């Protein structure tokens, strides 16, 4: 029987595995996490008991349901937790699991690798105590700890209000929720968001609960700096009326929405196109998740859509796989899933405008702001390298000249901001800056693993 491999045990990967199991297949489901659920439905580390009902709030029902559904299929699939896919070479997936390397051949590959935070650098963002917004949530759900006792949430993301609520709920204090997008832009983005009224309502409830708790909730801010002596002590910003304000805090959760984890798709041969709403290069797929023959993409790893869209798109991609294998599918189920994915992804386009990537703020950053924290490259170094270069400049060339994006994270963190700086200097909308090419290893691994002798 054909070997179907799914990478990612979030809602997209789980839903895909369910459809495949229901039709007699036994897919391999790989995830680097120790337990299934992905990012949004992350479970606490083994041995740790957390009040997940309280933490998940209105999402508790969905959280419990996805884990119950996974329990039902676990013995019907070849589930490989704690396994990182660090490279793809043709049909071969290079794996690292508990320090051991392995190679797995896939006849059909479904990548459901989810997303990660997108961050816009500000002066002081490399101080200890600044974490990404998603990192702040991972600390809470995975380890049961807060990133600080008094946390400032900075950026532009619907997850800021959710995370602020979770932090309050778990005993933390919220210094401020400071959103870089003006309130007017949120109002203008309302029409497409009415396509998912329940999700919209949930956002409004989070906003109301922040106001009720007395949390300062600012829109249209310009971050000036995160400051402190060796550790975060305060967030300094300019509010929408132009007044400088300071918020004492011991941690900052920084996030400007999410970006798909596309490195594996890149290595597997997906093609990419620039998306003007997300201001990112996204992998191309047809409406069912097909990328190229034998390669399928689903969930936030294809395009940001949220957990419900991820689940529906995972099921849809599994139906596409089965169709391509010659197995007749229930047309009604496929159509329902396709409609759901289209509706929810259109909602996310509205969100991308309501919580905008702060292009002008990134381009206006002073020269000494660090852009690439792995290699300690400043924005000024990138500007200087570009000014000294003749001919067309795109991000991979700037990477070679400055080492920006050449460190441990391979540009996964600094890539989007680098793209804006480069595009800003070439006077373009974003597209001509190009995208950093995916490189193996997609995440840091021990050198011995790359040599095939990890112990
Ligand atoms: C840090 C973070 C926190 C979030 N918190 C929330 C939240 O609280 N509420 C909410 O509504 N949404 C949240 N989201 C958004 C949420 O991720 C998505 O809506 C949803 O989980 C997408 O589902 P998915 O199946 O596409 O991907 P995910 O749920 O992200 O699952 C992808 C899985 O792929 C695995 N993976 C990725 N790359 C590899 C690799 N190379 N090798 C092996 N495994 C790999 C990951 O470990 C992960 O388990 C969060 C996102 C992030 C990044």
Image (tube, helix red, strand yellow):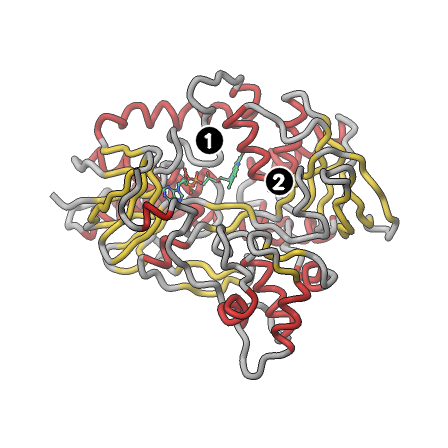
Left or right: residue 429 compared with residue 183: left
Mark 1 → mark 2, Cα distance in angstroms: 20 Å
Q: Is residue 88 above or below residue 135?
A: below
Q: Residue at x 55, y 23 (%)?
A: 144
In the rendered image, which quarter contains the N terminus? top left
Could you say where residue 140 lies in the image, as x and y percent from the top left? 56, 27
- Residue 301 badge: none
Q: Circles 1 and 2: CB distance less than 8 Å? A: no
- Structural crowding at the residue carrying mark 1, measured as other residues with C-alpha within 10 Å and reported as few (<14), some (14–19) or many (≥20): many
Disc 2: which residue:
131
Could you say where residue 99 lies in the image, as x and y percent from the top left? 33, 37
Q: Is residue 99 above or below residue 54?
A: below
Left or right: residue 382 compared with residue 95: right
In the image shown, does 313 or 386 lie closer to the viewer? Answer: 386
Q: Secondary structure at mark 1?
A: loop
Q: Can you see residue 183? A: yes
Q: Residue at x 64, y 53 (%)?
A: 120
- Residue 41 badge: 1
Left or right: residue 195 compared with residue 68: right
Mark 1 Cβ inside 8 Å of ligand 1: yes
In the image shown, does 391 or 325 lie closer to the viewer? Answer: 391
Could you say where residue 342 lies in the image, as x and y percent from the top left? 44, 50
Mark 2 Cβ inside 8 Å of ligand 1: no
Q: Residue at x 50, y 24 (%)?
A: 60
In the orientation shown, which residue stands out farthest toward the left?
1
Q: Quadrant of ligand 1?
A: top left
Q: Give the quarter of the image for residue 76.
A: top left
Q: Residue at x 59, y 79 (%)?
A: 389
């Amino acid at each position: 029987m054909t070997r179907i491999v799914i990478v990612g045990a979030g809602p997209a990967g789980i839903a895909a595995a369910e459809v495949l199991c229901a039709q007699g297949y036994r897919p391999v489901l790989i995830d680097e996490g120790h337990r299934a659920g992905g990012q949004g439905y992350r479970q606490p580390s083994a041995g740790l008991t957390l009040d997940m009902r309280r933490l998940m709030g209105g999402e508790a029902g969905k959280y419990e349901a996805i884990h119950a559904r996974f329990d039902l299929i676990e013995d019907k699939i070849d589930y490989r937790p704690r396994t990182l896919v660090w490279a793809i070479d043709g049909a071969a997936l290079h794996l690292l699991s508990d320090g051991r390397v392995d190679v797995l051949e896939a006849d059909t590959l479904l990548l459901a690798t989810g997303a990660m935070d997108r961050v816009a650098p500000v002066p002081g963002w490399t101080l200890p105590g600044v974490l990404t917004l998603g990192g702040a949530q991972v600390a809470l759900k995975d380890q049961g700890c807060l990133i600080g006792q008094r946390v400032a949430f900075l950026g532009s993301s619907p997850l800021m209000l959710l995370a602020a609520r979770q932090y309050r709920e778990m005993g933390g204090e919220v210094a401020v929720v400071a959103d870089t997008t003006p309130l007017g832009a949120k109002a203008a983005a309302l029409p497409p968001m009415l396509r998912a009224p329940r999700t919209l309502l949930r956002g409004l409830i989070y906003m109301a609960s922040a106001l009720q708790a007395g949390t300062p909730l600012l829109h249209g801010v310009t971050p000036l700096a995160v400051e402190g002596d060796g550790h975060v002590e305060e967030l300094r910003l300019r509010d929408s009326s132009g007044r400088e304000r300071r918020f004492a805090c011991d941690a900052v959760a920084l996030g400007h929405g999410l970006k798909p984890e596309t490195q594996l798709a890149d290595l597997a041969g997906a093609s990419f196109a620039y998306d003007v709403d997300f201001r990112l290069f996204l992998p191309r797929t047809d409406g069912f998740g097909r990328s190229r023959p034998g390669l399928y993409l689903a969930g936030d790893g294809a395009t940001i859509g949220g957990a419900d869209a991820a689940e529906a798109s995972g099921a849809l991609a599994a139906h596409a796989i089965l169709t391509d294998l010659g197995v007749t599918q229930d047309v009604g189920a496929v159509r329902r899933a396709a409609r759901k994915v289209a509706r929810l992804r259109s909602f996310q386009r509205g969100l991308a405008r309501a919580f905008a990537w702060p292009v002008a703020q990134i381009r206006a950053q002073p020269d000494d702001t660090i852009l690439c924290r792995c290699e300690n490259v400043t924005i000024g170094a990138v500007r200087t390298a570009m000014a000294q270069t003749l001919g067309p400049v795109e991000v991979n060339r700037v990477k070679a000249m400055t080492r920006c994006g050449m460190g441990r994270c391979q540009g996964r963190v600094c890539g989007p901001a680098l793209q804006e700086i480069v595009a800003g200097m070439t006077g373009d909308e974003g597209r001509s800056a190009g995208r950093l090419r995916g490189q193996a290893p997609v995440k840091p691994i021990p050198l011995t693993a790359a040599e095939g002798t990890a112990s």
